[in-house]
Amino acid sequence: LDDMNMSLSVVVWCILLQLSTVGAFVGPVKSPHNSIVGTQKLSSVVTELPDSLDDSAIIAAQACADFADANGEMGRCRVDFDTTVGDETFTVLKSSTEFMQKFVSALCYSMIDGLQQRRQDELMRVAQARAKLKRLLELDQQLTEGEDDDEEESEIDEESRKQRDELAEIIKSGGTSGAAPWDGPVARVYFPDEGNAALAQRDWKLGTDVPACVEFTACGGIVTQDTSRDELLFFFCPQASESENVERILLQAEEERGTNLKLTVFVNPNLVDMGVTGYGYAGRLLRERLIDRLQQTYYLRTLAWGALTRKWPDAFSVWQEDEDAPGGYRLISTLDRLPSNPEVEDIYDLENQKGESKEQGIIGALGEFVDGMMKL
């Protein structure tokens, strides 16, 4: 019996020694929840969920503008917007195009000098055109009613007809028809390739969907457009295959424009990929030079059971669907950093009392260690 106890003690001692040796390389064995509960920092400022896509775009634009004001010119930030809940029917670029249009518009009106006044002038032109068109139609109606039935129908004055057409066009265009071309600062949107840039040139209605200050360019190829007036840069869904071009364009813009370049925004970037940049030395260098320097000014990702959001400088906030809560969601956690996908699920599980107890003895820790090693 003494020999058995001695043997058992030796086995346990060997197991403890093995665990401590492994721990020197992979860190201490933790329960799934300890990585969140033990390290998260709560913030008193919670990021609320947006009411709609339009609201989300406005909030994101305001966060970027606030970041630019606080950090000065040549700032770099990123905006991540994903409401697909894992649905890959459409590409990320396609599914976030509507948000991008509204976000670019809101940020341009907030940061491009003279653009807000131009928009007010356009709205005034629309209001004046409506009033003039109404008076012309009323006058035509009076002239028509004053004619005798047996008289030949008088032709509407050609000049009056032309004027009505012009007024109708001003109303239809939102006040941009007939306006002088925009010659102020430019907000340039870089697309991953020339095809998407051409589609945006065709489908994004300049002056209505997006302001007249917006221009479209592809990351690949040679830039032939005049970039001397660029004040805002947007990289829309840049891919790992274009990471070198993106970095080159950004550094060149910062060198040429200097402090005239107010802000650079990366929207849904995917610049590190195993098949292109890899996750090794090259990927790490790219992260250090470019990705890690981007401030997360806005983040919104919908989940099967809720959402994760953040507006700079507020906290990352995790929300869970709850029919009894105001607005249909209740806050379950706030963090000072972006949590990983497993951490988000751990927060949900802990909130809903899923999983095993956090209290684990040596046998539980050993079982978790062995299970993890078997999955390698």
Image: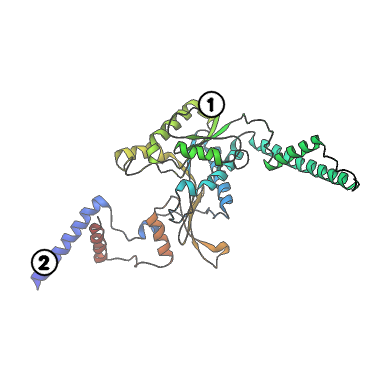
Estimate how packed mark 1 is, as few (under 14), some (14 to 19) or many (20 or more) residues with alpha carbons within 10 Å: few
> Which amino acid, mark 1?
Ser
Point 38% across, 34% down: residue: 244
Estimate how packed mark 2 is, as few (under 14), some (14 to 19) or many (20 or more) residues with alpha carbons within 10 Å: few
Q: Secondary structure at mark 1?
A: loop
Point 42% across, 33% down: residue: 220
Q: In which quadrant of the rendered view does residue 288 lie?
A: top left
Q: Secondary structure at mark 2?
A: helix
For residue 228, the mark is 1
Task: Decide which of 372, 182 is in the foreground and name it.
Answer: 182
Q: Give the residue at mark 2.
A: 7
According to the image, what is the colour scheme of the structure?
rainbow
Point 22% across, 57% down: residue: 19
Q: CA distance from mark 2 to mark 1?
A: 79 Å
Quadrant of the drawing holding the N terminus: bottom left
Quadrant of the drawing holding the C terminus: bottom left
> Which amino acid, mark 2?
Ser
Q: Is residue 158 left or right of residue 15?
A: right
Task: Decide which of 43, 73 is in the foreground and name it.
Answer: 73
